[in-house]
Image (cartoon, rainbow, N blue to C red):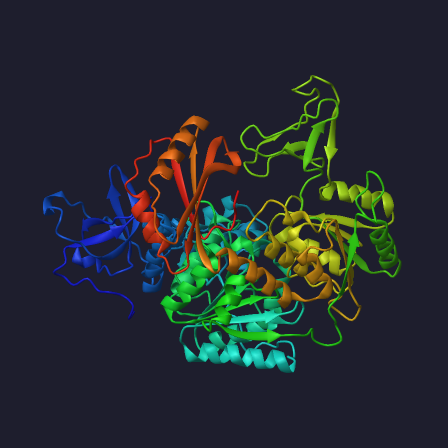
Amino acid sequence: MTDLLPLDEPFDRVSVLLPLPLDVAYDYKADPALGLARGAIVEVPLGKRRLVGVVLGPGGDEVAEERLRAVVRAFDVPPLPAAVLDLVDWVAAWTLAPRGNVLRMAISSPGALEPPPPVIVLTAVPEAAWPAGTRMTPARRRVLAALDGPALEPRDLMREAGIGPAVLKSMLEAGLLERHALPPPPPFQPPDPDGTGHALTGEQADAAEALRSAVAARAFSVTMLDGVTGSGKTEVYFEAVAAALTAGQQALVLLPEIALSAQWLQRFADRFGTAPAVWHSDLKPTVRRQTWRAVADGTARVLVGARSALFLPFPELGLIVIDEEHEPAYKQEDGVAYQARDMAVVRARLQGVPIALVSATPSLETLENVRAGRYRALHLAARPGIAELPSVELIDLRRDRPDRGRFLAPTLVRAVEATLAEGEQVLLFLNRRGYAPLTLCRTCGHRLECPNCTAWLVEHRLLGRLQCHHCGFSGRLPRACPSCAAEDSFVASGPGVERLAEEVLSRFPDARFQIASSDTIVGPDQAAEFVRAVNAREIDVIVGTQIVAKGHHFPWLTLVGVVDADLGLAGGDLRAGERTYQMLHQVSGRAGRAERPGRVLLQTHVPENPVMAALAAGDRDRFLEFEAEQRRLAGMPPFGRLAALVVSAPDAERADAAARLVARAAPRLDGVTVLGPAPAPLALLRGRHRRRLLVKARKEINLQRVLRDWLAPLKLEGAVRLAIDVDPYSFM
């Protein structure tokens, strides 16, 4: 392969990077017979352990020959492509994470490095070769009759012949059967690029041709595909995937909620005749091993995955697609804090391939890159056929108030009744899991709080538990208040989807409803069943959270009611307005996607808010211009740089002391402002006390260099952790 750097025979040592929280690589002796090359995956000793590592190149001469330990073996898998190794270095430098931690994401399935087990099949030995005196029984005759054709695996043979394993064992020992080891079949069928797709409209065809041309150019480019909800963006970029397949290349598609994307997977199978390879955290270990190896050896031609799929070792990558590119789910905040959308652009540049960023509500970062001429823009302004965008109306909760103890305003109740009477479907959207976000004592006002976090416990009445959505703590509702000892005094405050479902049952007793949240729909199988039930019109009312806000196409869903449209606007988050607009625009787009017109009702206490006004007017661009101007005036991303530093410790005193130490060492540079330290909004998380500093810098400043020079000399005690998040998305 041309992207490998050979290690010629004179090099008797190699530099190996290990998937540990280390920046440095270690030197090892290398037997030239191993034929190692840059990117080779090897097993090496470290202390008393043996670890998997990756060869970066020839070793140095700093360590004496006699002190070097030897590479144990090289795995029989293709080397990691140069673009993956370069991406590891790039991500580590950008996020200030150790290179070894980033490498761990590229070799995240160690089991895939071992060859897959062969397929064992059995055949019958010709009768002329049977040993003398062979005894034939009815069971043995059934086995031989079943083998009068192709060879069979033992479990299939036992089922066909109606026998147990003892019969097969005796026939093998008697020389009547032969065992054969065959290579396993490829786990994925190649998609057919010539499969039948939907007929494209004029603007869809123009956009598809532009993406096909980008694939044919085999060069780095970034294209924003901006289309209203239901405009056929998926069908358009499917044409680019087909072009990559025709050119003998692989394609990678990232989705923010891959485990819940049943409809997308079905649309892919309808277009290409087979399912794609899939990559996400819920894969079974066997499938994970098969998928990693199939990507590495090129037999997986198209893979759809979550953000971690970005680090898979594609040897022939020809196209990257980031669907719903605006989604916050692309930002990883634990471990290596990286933005998968941005790092995907980096991988496309390193690999020299085109990338498409797809959304109905593009991020301000992407729009700014389009304005600056770094990205190209394609627009889909209309839904195909007779489908039209839904009307959007605001319900002012200050005037149109729900009944006491209820959460649906009279206007929304009447709209639901009318929709159900027409035999159509309703989505009631509330982005809050569980029954109630807060449980308090009606006697003294005490609020039940997580013992490990600065967060209220959320009641999940279906489970009969109180849960923390940050650390996972779970417990039963106490009989007596721990503050005033009053018994049976706790009351739920505020609605979650479970409580909203109670109101649906009470108001619309004949309606069939389902709660759709990450508590009730877990994994692809349940997601597929949910989609089937909605399309089969077995569900009249969906009570859902953000997992139903995007991507779904339900032809009979004509009314969307947003119960608390203001929910995402509180808290002072930099991106609160943008995120709220994006989510509400996406959930609104579920209505009226076929020939029946759609209607969206947004319940709000602040209809004058720019987000609400823009949604009601259908004026996305005006809102984004307003949001961009506010960020520009404040010097905030994408017009400035941010980094968050979170100091945490087992107790508050040590957290405060460490945070003060970090703050005292802060640089005093023109164009760099350090805010804090202050308690983080989640001042206690998973039992650790947290203090936060925010670093703000002008866009032209090398923020990573500032942070390295500032933080590298600091000596923090062992119990203290310092987490660095360059370009933070969450401010908790």
Judge whether 437 appears above or below 82 on screen.
Answer: above
Does residue 120 appear anywhere in the picture?
no
The residue shown at (30%, 45%) is 51
The residue shown at (60%, 57%) is 578
From this viewpoint, which residue is outermost toward the top?
485
The residue shown at (42%, 31%) is 656
State which quarter of the image contains the N terminus.
Answer: bottom left
Location of residue 614 in the rendering, given as x and y in whole percent from the top left corner: 68, 62
Judge whether 530 appears above or below 724 on screen.
Answer: below
- Image side of residue 452 versus residue 12, left or right: right
Location of residue 652 in the rendering, given as x and y in whole percent from the top left corner: 46, 28
Along the line of sight, the residue nearer the viewer: 683 or 498: 683
Judge whether 519 appears above or below 439 on screen.
Answer: below
- Image side of residue 675 versus residue 139, left or right: left
- Image side of residue 573 versus residue 213, left or right: right
Does residue 522 appear anywhere in the picture?
yes
Residue 436 lies in what quarter of the image?
Answer: top right
Along the line of sight, the residue nearer the viewer: 13 or 322: 322
Along the line of sight, the residue nearer the viewer: 725 or 560: 725
The residue shown at (47%, 53%) is 288
Location of residue 306 in the rendering, given as x and y in whole percent from the top left corner: 51, 56
Judge whether 492 appears above or below 542 on screen.
Answer: above
